[in-house]
Amino acid sequence: MGSNPLETTMAKIDKKRKKIEERIEFLENDMKLNLKQKVSNTAEISVSDYLTKIQDLRKQLNELK
């Protein structure tokens, strides 16, 4: 018996959703860590870049629901 195409599609969407959620979590943690460790000689941390990337990923995630 072959696999159900709908189940295969749903599995792919779930996998993509999980990957996006993991990326959001990574970016949030990375931003927090960089802000905590910032010292005067550290290059600038672009919070707006982090927030823009996170916002874009959240939008992609909502489109999958």
Image: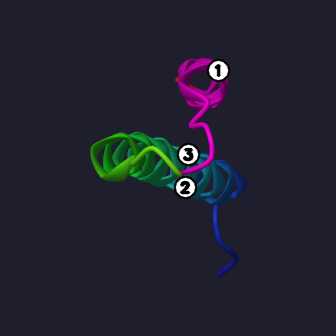
The disc label shown at residue 33, or none: none
> Are dots 2 and 3 in contact, CB under 8 Å?
yes
Q: Quadrant of the N terminus?
A: bottom right
Q: Which region is colored magenta? A: 42-64
Residue type pointed to by label 2: Lys
Q: Residue at x 56, y 45 (%)?
A: 20
User: Label 3 neighbourhood size at 10 Å, few (<14), some (14-19), many (20+)?
Assistant: some
Q: Earlier in the sequence, mark 2 or mark 1?
A: 2
Q: Residue furthest left?
A: 36
Front position among marks 2 and 1: 1
Tag 3's secondary structure? helix
Instruction: Please name whichever residue, 51 or 61, is drawn nearer the observer in this view of the structure.
Output: 51
Q: How many marks do you count on the picture?
A: 3
- The residue that disc 2 covers is 19
Q: Which label sits on residue 52?
A: 1
Q: Nearer the viewer, residue 60 or 52?
A: 52
Residue type at the position of mark 1: Thr
Work out whether mark 1 precedes mark 3 in sequence or the reverse, and give the earlier one.
Answer: 3
Q: Position of residue 29 (x, y in %)?
A: 35, 48
Instruction: Measure the C-alpha gap from mark 2 to mark 3.
Output: 4 Å
Cα gap from disc 2 to disc 1, whole angstroms: 18 Å
Q: CA gap, disc 1 to disc 3? A: 14 Å
Dominant secondary structure, magenta:
helix
